Amino acid sequence: MQIPHESFRLAPGAAGTLQQQIRARVAEGILAGRFRAGDKMPSSRGLAAHLGISRITVTLAYADLVAQDFLTPAGRSGYFVSATAPQQPLFPQAAAPPGRQVDYAALTDRRFSRNARAEKPQDWASYPFPFIYGQADAQLFDHQNWRLCALRALGRRDFDTLTSDYYERDDPLLIEYILRHILPRRGIDAAPAEVLLTLGAQNALWLAAQVLGGPGRRMVMENPGYPGLRAVLAQSGGETLYVDVDEDGLPPDRLPPADVVFTTASHHCPTNATMPLARRVALLAAASARDFVIVEDDYEFEMSFLAPAAPSLKSLDREGRVIYAGSFSKSLFPGLRLGYLVGPEGFIAEARALRATVLRHPPGHVQRTAAYFLSLGHYDALIARMKTAFRRRRMAMDEAIAAHGLTMAGQGGFGGSSVWMRAPDGVDCDALALNLRGQGVLIEPGRVFFGPADAPGNFYRLAFSSIPPGRIAEGVARIAAALAR
Amino acid sequence: MQIPHESFRLAPGAAGTLQQQIRARVAEGILAGRFRAGDKMPSSRGLAAHLGISRITVTLAYADLVAQDFLTPAGRSGYFVSATAPQQPLFPQAAAPPGRQVDYAALTDRRFSRNARAEKPQDWASYPFPFIYGQADAQLFDHQNWRLCALRALGRRDFDTLTSDYYERDDPLLIEYILRHILPRRGIDAAPAEVLLTLGAQNALWLAAQVLGGPGRRMVMENPGYPGLRAVLAQSGGETLYVDVDEDGLPPDRLPPADVVFTTASHHCPTNATMPLARRVALLAAASARDFVIVEDDYEFEMSFLAPAAPSLKSLDREGRVIYAGSFSKSLFPGLRLGYLVGPEGFIAEARALRATVLRHPPGHVQRTAAYFLSLGHYDALIARMKTAFRRRRMAMDEAIAAHGLTMAGQGGFGGSSVWMRAPDGVDCDALALNLRGQGVLIEPGRVFFGPADAPGNFYRLAFSSIPPGRIAEGVARIAAALAR
């Protein structure tokens, strides 16, 4: 690449002659890996003009660098970074600059990073048996039609959609599709002012918790429950209360006094339990009687291949008590970062204003591409294909798990993309996962799903959304063998 | 479209016979605009199975709807919504459902939406004289190469980049380009752990304010200053202090005791003042002596067509006191929603953990497309083209403003994309803007840039990033005429 002359400046009060300063700056850049073999230096004339110094000073500095093999001259073409220039590793930790440094750990109390946890390995796709949750399967995704829709959304006619700052607004095409085609499947009727696009379900939950939370507010989450929600609630300023779920999900009669209750009613995370209708009605009655609001995370309703998806809680809501969060991360792909909130207009107006301050809006191109993919029917076709594939994988899971006598703790009567497993008492699934990783098997230890008190160590989750069906039997066999040891 | 059978459910305890309920649900859907002329109804067999009722019940309901012209039969193909079906406006406000409703205005105190303000009109591009700031100009943008880069980023080889959940990580290709090619132009050396991608500059400022703010923290903003920062600081939990700027930007000797100081040092928003080097050094010395941190919003450095961009504050920082916020919104387009933060590793780690909770990461496709566009040199070519065009427009602005005797209050010695104007005392620029809008001229009234106390009403901003140069003279003439009245 051409190294821009702006890379060079003469620091006020720097030590050494001008020639030495230029020489040092070039050598530093090469050693730190910012300038690389073959990169072209600014012309001596251009650099001299930029720095307001004599051209001969630059020429002498360059000559010195040539002598030390940092640079190679190429006749009239100028100077290039030498192929044999001294090197150091690319982007080493920047050396601590001289002088006192601000202590950000003290300044921030590390309040955001303190509880960050290691996610699945970055190279999960290179493992032969990845029982991991929530990534897209390249074998199933309709890459071809996604490309065509993206290309259409890049066309001249969509220039404004691509480039404009929407401020607080959303793409009306995508909103209309969600209202007309997706929400009715969940029994939900809504108007445009009752829907807001978000950067995925994580962002939807965060916005809801910020709008509904605050000092003194009691926020309930399921135990076990979605780990991504814990940090969201911690940031809401309220108090987080954990309620143990049973085989039907969140039990309304065990709820403490609360202001906001977060639930994954249709497919509990991580046990996959589906809350029966009677309990849904009881939960809404409790919300009305005790005046709390419910946030329903309906993250995976599309994957109902064993039984029709139960109607959403929101579809039974008569008082505007339910805020509904949906996502395209599971049905399209998580890197899309697209989800939505549905709720009464007064709630959505707050969430919209907050989103405008925090991030404005999801990129216009992403919104429009999804709108095309959905409205051309590719989404429906994809869901149908995924359901067929997931059903097959689920059957393979059930067989392998039964054959090895492993214990399912929750399997999802509706379908889903994972099963919740219990190892024998005393097994530490963190150690189990580490052990299995060495054998090419990735599982998700269950501790992270539990609240801080008394998290049991002998649960794990096996997802089948990214593993080929032909590998399931062998993967489960390796888990069984590891457990037997 | 095919109406999915999931759109139909029998509400527990609903009034009327099953046949009446189905009929009502179809009619409601058509009247509300959810089902439209030509949409295909579920088959009577499929809907009956879905609802668990007799097929004849569905058939009778459909027959009734045909008689009332909601539906049209099409022989063996089934039933369609009739082209002459009764209609109501599309998506009317959803009728308030029966029963008590949660009062979200009371619950949330409208704390996010209360101070939301009307942005520029959505249809700004249809005005002949849009002196508005910050939107992309279709005449200048390199749409063709952007498409090619996006297409490449949609390829099989980038499948994981497109679809994966990155959690807290960023696209290494884009990070490397920023480190090697963009930051050096601002005199900044940084390592990968010192950079974080954001959803535009707005998100960068928000993250910085959240990490550095908190109860009791004193947050300084420039007055006048960037309006988008006000809500960001209000959400940070600290106290917002306003400091009046002068013709050299923020004066360090007028700073109150502070914890965090936000500044647009290189091109003050909205006056376009460039802080001289001596003042930069003084500001950093004050930060060191009084132990505050600086957030430098360097939103428009690329547009330096009159003089080279002054080195960034960050380039002079020896103590890790400066957090740098950059953006591609001005140099590429705002709908991209892509910016970045640069700071010491301890700060970036906090911002990264916070971003992961709030939104995970900017969509992978957006990151990779930008990385290709930058690394193939299209970005540099675009900047060069924009500088030439903006210089021409700026000359036209200067001429027209001088010709009509209007008063510039700040014009940006380096370049930029706007001028800051003062109308005669007593002129209300909100009223002026409204008046001019009726004549096809969009200007930005200046009141929104000032702090809550004593905001003068006689300033306005004229941006030239979206107006064709041939229209500038006539646009300014219309402003002068309106002011003369």
Image (tube, coloured by chain):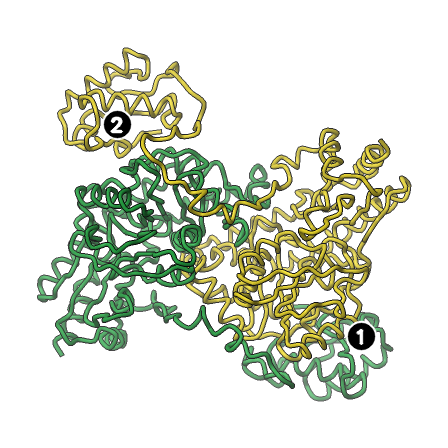
Chain colours: A yellow, B green
Q: Nearer the viewer, residue B432 or A444?
A: A444
x, y percentage for residue B228?
Answer: 36, 61
In this image, A480 relative to B198: left or right?
right
In this rendering, the answer to whether B331 lies above or below A310 is above
In this rendering, the answer to whether A27 lies above or below A372 is above
Q: Amino acid at mark 1?
A: Ser
Host chain of mark 1? B
Q: Amino acid at mark 2?
A: Pro
Answer whether labels 1 and 2 touch (C-beta < 8 Å). no
Q: Nearer the viewer, residue A349 or B52?
A: A349
Q: Secondary structure at mark 2?
A: loop
Q: Quickly name the residue at label 1.
A: B44
Residue pictured at 82% horizontal, 38% vertical: A476
Q: Secondary structure at mark 1?
A: helix
Please tell me the numbered disc located at residue A42.
Answer: 2
Q: CA distance from mark 1 to mark 2?
A: 75 Å
Q: Quadrant of the C terminus of chain A?
A: top right
Residue B337 visible at all: no
Host chain of mark 2? A
